[in-house]
Image (cartoon, rainbow, N blue to C red):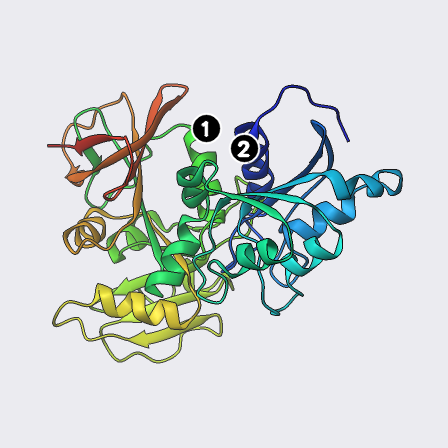
Amino acid sequence: MHAVQNMNHDTFMRRCFDLARLGSFGVQTNPMVGCVIVHESRVIGEGYHEAIGKPHAEVNAINAVRPEDRKLLRDSTLYVSLEPCNHFGRTPPCSLRIVQEKIPRVVISCPDPNPDVTGKGANYLREHGVDVTMGILEEEGRFLIRRFLHWVKQRLPYVTLKWAQSKNLLMGVPGKQVWLSNAFSKVLVHKLRAEHAGIMVGTDTALTDKPKLNTREYPGPSPVRIIPDRKGRIPDTHPLFSDGIPTLLYSGISRASVAAHVTIIPVDYSGENLGLVLEDLAARNIHSLMVEGGAALLNAFIKDGLWQEAWVIRVKKAIEKGIKAPLLHGTLREKFNLEDDEVLHIQNRAPGNVDEVLINS
C-alpha cells in the first residue's frame, strides 16, 4: 500500500467513492460501496464490493491488509461509503467482522436505506465500543448509490434519459438515420448503457436506426433491450429479433413468438401505460432503465415525470429540418465538453446547491 500525508476525512471518503465505482457493473441491485483502512495517515487496506453475492467492501479491505500490518487494525480508522450491514444475507454482517477485528473507529458517508440495515449497523458498532462518525460527504455518497436508493424506496427502475441534439435544437429527421455526436460521446453513451439493467427505444427509432443497443464501445455488460411496439410495426425479420440478445417486446397487438431470445409482453396501449411497463420491468428485476429515444418516447417519460436523470449531448452542427428535441426542466449536475460536443447531466428535482436549467425552451 502507499503512504499518504496530511489527508482528512473528505480525502479518504472520496477514495472510497472511487473504489466503489469499480464495482458499478457487477453489483446489480446491490449498492456500489468502497472502503479504505487508514493507520496514522497511511492506507493499509482498501477494497470494494465487486459483485453480488461476493464479499462486501469492508471485508475485502480487511483481507487486503498485509500480514505484517494486521496488528495495526486495532489502532486504525475504517472509512466506508455506506453504512456497514448488520444482517445475514448472501454474506455475513460486515459490522460483526469490524468488531471481531477490533477496529476502533469507523467513518461513514451515508446510512443504508435498506430497512433491514438503516441505523442498525452503526448502532451495533457503537454498542461494541466503536467510535462511529456518520455523514461525511453524505450528498455525494447518496448520489453514488442513487439507482439503489430509488430501487429500495420505489421498487421501480431508475430511469435515465439520453439524446443528442443539433445546434438548432433538432434530434433527427423522420425516416432517416442521423448521427450527431462524436466518437468520444459515443463511448460515454456505451458506458452509461453498461451501468443500466435495461435500455429502451421507441418503434420509430428501432425501425429507422436498427440499433444494436449494446456496449461494443465500452468494456461492460450490455443491458436487456426493451421495445414498446404499440401497433406491431416491427417485422419478424428485424435484426433485433435475429441476433440472440435478450429482448423484451411490449406489444399492443396479439403476436406469436418470433425468437427464443425475445419475450413478448402484451400491453393495453389505450391509456397511460408507461407506469405499468415500469412495474412489469421491476417484477423482472430490471432495476435501472436507459431511454435513448425517439422524441415521442422521451417526451412521454418527461410528461409523466417518470425520469430521474438525463444526459443531453449538444453538438455544433445543424439540421435543416427535423424532429424537435424534448423540452426538459431539471437541475444541472454537471456540464463538460467531449471535444466539440457539450454534455449536460441533469437531475429531476435534484437536491442541494445546483443550477436550475430549462433545456430547449
Determine the residue positioned at 57% across, 36% down. Answer: 18
Kind of residue at disc 2: Arg
Residue 86: quadrant of the picture: bottom right
Kind of residue at disc 1: Phe
Q: Which residue is mark 2?
A: 14
Q: Position of residue 150 (x, y in %)?
A: 36, 56
Asked whether, in this view, residue 129 is left or right of residue 184, the answer is right
Task: Give the quadrant of the C terminus.
Answer: top left
Disc 2/disc 1 C-alpha distance (Å)? 26 Å
Name the secondary structure under disc 1: helix
Task: Give the quadrant of the N terminus.
Answer: top right
Q: Position of residue 14 (x, y in %)?
A: 54, 32
Q: Is any atom of residue 238 visible in this view?
A: no
Asked whether, in this view, residue 131 is left or right of residue 170, the answer is right
Q: Which residue is mark 1?
A: 184
Determine the residue positioned at 60% across, 55% down. Answer: 125
Residue 315: quadrant of the picture: top left
Camera-nearest residue between 114 and 106: 106
Q: Residues within 10 Å of mark 2 (few under 14, many from 20)?
A: many
Q: Is any atom of residue 100 visible in this view?
A: yes
